[in-house]
Image (spheres, helix red, strand yellow):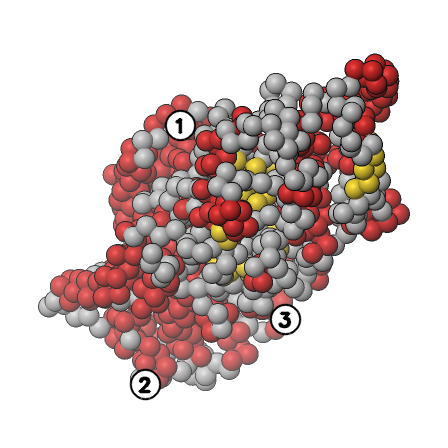
Amino acid sequence: MKTLLKEGIKPHDGATRVDGKKWSLMEKLLLGLTLDQYVQQVIRNKFNWLLAAIFIVGVPLIIYRFVFGLGVVTHSSYEYPWGLLLGFGLFCMVPLSASGFMLGTTVEIFGRHDFEPIERLALLNGLLGYFFAVVYLLVDLGQPWRLAYPMVYSFGPAAVLFLVGWHVATYLSVQIAEVSTAFFEWIGFRRGYEFIRKGTIGLTVSGIILSTLHQGALGALFVYAPGKVHPLWYSAPFQWIHFFVSSIPAGLSMVICVSTVVIYTMKWRCDKRFIESLDRITISLAKGAAMGLITYLFIKFLAVAHDNEWAYLATGWGAWWLFEIFFGVVLALITFCVGIHHKNVALCRLGALITVLGILLNRLNTSLITFNWELYQEVPHVFEIIISITIFALYIATYRFILNRLPILYQYKSGVDS
Amino acid sequence: MANSAKTIMKGALALLFFFSLFMNCYATESYPGEIYIDILANHYQAVVFDHDLHVMVSEGCATCHHHTTGMPVINTYCASCHSADESAATVSCQGCHSKEPVTAGSMQQERAAFVFHDDKPDLKGAYHLSCLGCHQQMGAPTGCQDCHARTEAGDRFFNSGMFAPAH
Amino acid sequence: MCNISRRKFLAGSVAGGAAIAMAPAKKAFGANLSGFPDGLGVLVDMTRCVGCRSCEAACNKEQNLPEPDKAFDDYTVFDERPHGQHRRPTEKAYTVVNRYDQADGEKVYRKIQCNHCNEPACLTSCFVNAYKKTPEGAVTYNDKVCVGCRNCMVACPFNIPAFSYSSAFNPIIKKCIFCYDTRLKNGQAPACVEICPQQVMLFGKRQELIKIAHDRMRRNPGKYVETLYGDKEVGGTGWLYLSHVPFKEAGFNVSLPNEPIINNVKDFLAIVPMVLAIWPALFTGFHLLSTKGKSHGHADNHRHDGQEGHE
């Protein structure tokens, strides 16, 4: 794209072309480039080669899984029914996608319109994170074609997973509605855009409700397994609060990380408003994340105190827990604080990266690493790892595809009713 | 391992048998020398029970027959009622132990008639608990087929012999 | 005895999703329910087990399970240690007998199968209600609705449900169903109980089995350890165990709570209707407070900005 920009070609960013004509849908899809230009820039980009390599290996493996069953791509473990596909795909992707409701709340509910430039990115991050969590789930479910059963056919309403299922499904719809405003602008469906905008407050509030409950519910899922999850990672009364509170810095940090990647690799797509406000917004988001982290740190120790688990800290698992806390929470917190104090955007971004890694570590610890701590350690099958990477690559590709087109990072020049 | 123990035991029992021919205190009473137990045969063939041999090696009838033969009872729980040396009408195992499987419900019925007969095993249980328990203590054979050879139905049931898994 | 189970209360209250529904539910949480009063169970007396594996064979035939990897009279399976652990029920075997070698050289055998909990964790964790606790005491499973999420395997404190990973198009959970279809619903003992030569297992009403177990302990002082496993564990199980060695030495999980697993989750389930009821008003209130006197038309700003740039 850089090459094209140098040649003076302007990508599509509004309803009408420079010469006053409207863009056709095909032209919009090609970013306003000619087909040749588009294909050339795709081939020029080294990252596309990496994605292609991942898909060449991974997509056949996913097909292999659906033809021969989960047994051929996982260790088919009875003791570890949930492997990497859910441990990473569901339990990590969902908290990292908490950004949608966080920024939605900030902008729409609290009226902080200074966060507006990043709101749509946060909403999209939420939507795609959830969507791909469901993709991971579909690959991992034994009978994915029955996914809708708990909605329409057979109800188990006392189960936490029932809650997760319903809430993720409804929240996904809410997020599609929220992001659809950008889509309606892009295809030029003015009335759809206005219809959704009218319901913004309702959508945002239902987003908060659903997020509170299912972020917490993912934690509560592990409350079914006392004795399997290590006591330090297990807390019957607090597990859902831990998962919910940690999802706040996780979601905010994920937005910081994504915006960082975007500003370095896709700057052409960002408009002036986004570029100029990003530093200020990053620091503000870092403040929010730091507040979330310190709350999380406090309630993590509160849970240890509540169940009187101090003695476990002296064991090997205790050292691992302390590492998770000091790396993922305390170090991230310090980095954020220094970054915020000195208005150092780079440090805030580093803090966000550490937070994201810390949350990954926490979710993997709960769902895989310390799970069955008294039995044996399960190392995921190499095919399972490849499939997880493939779906993540698909996530990145989709993310980029949408960012390139829809008015997420830039404001759409609609010009319809002018 | 089991086989060598078996050989030694056989030798020892044979010796014991010769001595006890002259010393057996129950020699005058009548009892079957050999019992053919086929009442439960299905997966296994009938057991040919060498009663004579077991009379020789046991400490007394009460070891297996509780109070029924009129001998002093060994089990203290039984002894609390059956102290008198009166023999019972039936002495055979199946005379008292039901061929039908015992359940908690059937035990309750039994208890209504005999208040202390409250944990009586069924016939299959009685045979195995009595025989196998003693065999374990005495170092006698304890393998299933040491006492009863398996039938073809049994081989099929255990996926063994000609029905063994292919791999 | 109250014959409405805690599950039903929970189901009702969560489905209702309203704060009002929590009033009766709270009562149910406090009540001490111990399953169906006439529920059947099995008392396992481990002192009697000799490890003949007849029960495994009987189960295999009764439930039409696939051919085993090794013959049922092959006792080398007792030395198998998959993942360093003793054997466990699998998709091909609903029950297994294991040997636990004691420090003094004694060999203890223990049969493992679904314990048929009074308040089954698998059931309460299932989001399509595939599991059912029948009045007879069996925990059965409906493979027609199973989505294959395997939450029941996570929830089961005894690691019993086994997923048929080998199947691509109809993978389901395989577990002991107490021979419900073929025997239990007619009042018959399961196949494993019937085949056992040593009468290790006694079939009957759970309440009576508990009495019989305590009678055995009382009548044979020193023979048994002084607890009946399954009497209290996770709210009580249909299958109960008597042992002469400490249960830990026979591979039992002795750190299980006496409360049903669902009790751990009730804290969270209780907040669900609260959040549903309180959040809308709370956050709409925040919105009104924080945007009072300010322009709150975000959409309009957005559009104007865009047009300014263009025109």
Q: Position of residue A207 (x, y in %)?
A: 32, 64
**Residue C76 locus on image (x, y percent):** 75, 34
- Under mark 1, the amino acid is Tyr
Q: Which residue is mark 1?
A: A312
Residue that carries the numbered disc 2 in the rendered image: A417
Quarter residue A276 falls in = bottom left
Q: Are marks 2 and 1 in contact (CB under 8 Å)?
A: no
Contact (CB < 8 A) between labels 2 and 3? no
Q: Amino acid at mark 2?
A: Asp
The disc labelled 3 sits on which kind of residue? Asp
Residue for point 75% across, 35% down? C75
Instruction: Say whether disc 2 or disc 3 marks the residue closer to the N-terminus.
Output: 3
The residue labelled by disc 3 is A36
The percent coordinates of residue A158 (x first, y second) are: 39, 60
Q: Residue at x 31, y 80 (%)?
A: A194
Q: Quadrant of residue A319?
A: top left
